[in-house]
Amino acid sequence: MRDEPNSTKPCCGSAVFLAVQLTVTRAEDLINEKRDVLNPFCVVKCEGDTVKTKVIKDSSSPQWNDKFIFYKKANGERKPITLQIFSSQTLSNTPLGEAEISDFSDSEGQNLTLTLFQKSKKKDVADIELPGKLHVHVCSSENLSEF
């Protein structure tokens, strides 16, 4: 998460920022093929920032309701927000799936149900859809102090 940018017009250009408020609400029907116990958390990546939700112990349908605010450049290429779900384990975290949000331009806000997938390591092979869903709420504004 970033502090609010000082200006919407930097000295060398006319970048406009977009404030995006993302609430990672919950996940459902998560499956870990390696273990019976799930301790899920969600990692969110946006514009070089990485944040994570709290770990929910022993749940395949965790409720987080964790809210984050990001500042994105509104002009030029809009990179998606990436969400990755892991199960916290003693030695390493086990990936349970990931999702992306490409459209975050709705100022009224929208509830999204995202399908989880495993990204293919090969460019010519499709991503693999995984069990489980991720529920989020996303809204945005060019008024950087709105949230």
Image (spheres, helix red, strand yellow):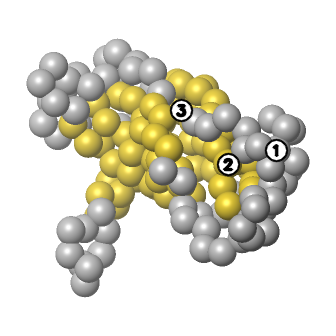
Q: Quadrant of the N terminus?
A: top right
Is label 1 in contact with label 2 (beta carbons under 8 Å)? yes
Element at label 2: strand
Which numbered tag is attached to residue 13?
none
Q: Where is residue 36 drawn, in percent x and y?
A: 18, 26
Tag 2 or tag 1, which sits nearer the N-term? 2
Work out whether residue 41 can be spotted: yes
Residue under label 3? 26
Q: Quadrant of the C terminus?
A: top right
State the residue at coordinates (32%, 54%). 130
| Residue type (three-letter) at the residue carrying disc 3 | Arg
**C-alpha separation, residue under disc 2 versus residue under disc 3:** 23 Å
Q: Is 117 located above or below residue 42 in the figure?
A: below
| Residue type (three-letter) at the residue carrying disc 1 | Leu
State the residue at coordinates (31%, 68%). 127
Q: Is 48 located above or below residue 38 in the figure?
A: below
Q: Where is residue 52 drawn, in percent x and y?
A: 45, 31
Residue under label 1? 144
**C-alpha separation, residue under disc 1 versus residue under disc 3:** 26 Å
Which numbered tag is attached to residue 71?
2
Q: Where is residue 26 drawn, in percent x and y?
A: 53, 32
- Compared across the picture, whether 141 is left or right of 70 comes to right
Count all numbered tags in the image, as a single digit. 3
Q: Is 102 located above or below residue 139 in the figure?
A: below
- Compared across the picture, whether 35 is left or right of 102 comes to left
Viewer-nearest residue: 140 or 85: 140
Viewer-nearest residue: 7 or 112: 7
State the residue at coordinates (30%, 63%). 119
